[in-house]
Amino acid sequence: MTESDREASLQRLLDLEAIRDLARRYAHCVWQKDSAGAIALFTDDAVMDTGDRPPIVGRAALLQSYADMFAISDFRPFVHNHVIEIDGDRAEGTCYLDLRSVIEGKAMAGHGFYKDRYVRVGASWKFTYRLRNMVELPQL
């Protein structure tokens, strides 16, 4: 293996870990009801598609939407099994999700996944698009 190959392999590993950390940080911010922290993980023109309402476009709209949601609901996401395909400074991935929540006083649980698109911005990776695909489980 050449020095160039080693450097490329190392960069790929660093990129994979940074993207996985992006999803973990997002989940952490949601647990903490940290709207500003969650939104900082997105590009200025990012789109969040929750699948149950029109997509939220742009950081300003995301910030307002998250602040509104966090005021009346509690979300406890657990993310795992992150699969990522990197293409230079862009990437796509699927991140699986188990979610426990209380929405407007009603406890719910579900599972699903995020289909994500990422872009490198400077030395960081950011979400450009998140599509949440959820299945709610009946409460016993």
Image (tube, grey):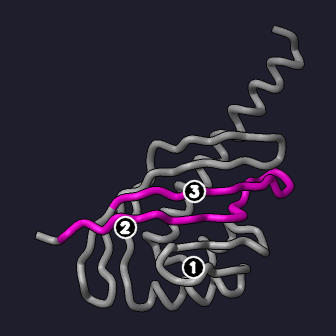
Say whether disc 1 or disc 3 marks the residue closer to the N-terminus.
Answer: 1
N-term-proximal mark, 1 vs 2: 1
Sooner in the amino-acid sequence: mark 2 or mark 3? 2
Amino acid found under the numbered disc labelled 2: Arg
Q: Which residue is mark 2?
A: 76
**Above/below status of 28 relative to 33:** above
* SS at mark 2 in the image: strand
Q: Residues within 10 Å of mark 3 (few under 14, many from 20)?
A: some
Q: CA distance from mark 2 to mark 3?
A: 19 Å
Q: Secondary structure at mark 3?
A: strand
Residue 82 is situated, as x and y percent measured from the top left of the image, at 52, 44
| Res 62 label | none
Residue at image x 46%, y 56%?
113
* Relative horizontal placement of residue 36, taking residue 132 as reference (left or right): right
**Residue at which label 1 appears:** 35
Query: Mark 1 to mark 2: distance in Å?
Result: 14 Å
Residue interval drawn in magenta: 111-138
Q: Say which quarter of the image contains residue 70.
A: bottom left
At 58% across and 73% down in the image, what residue appears? Answer: 49
Q: Name the amino acid type tagged 1.
A: Ser
Look at the magenta stretch and give its main secondary structure: strand
In magenta segment, residue 124: yes
**Residue at the (83%, 41%) spot, across then down:** 88
Q: Residues within 10 Å of mark 2 (few under 14, many from 20)?
A: some
Extreme top residue here? 1
Residue 41: percent from the left, percent from the top? 67, 65
Disc assigned to residue 115: 3
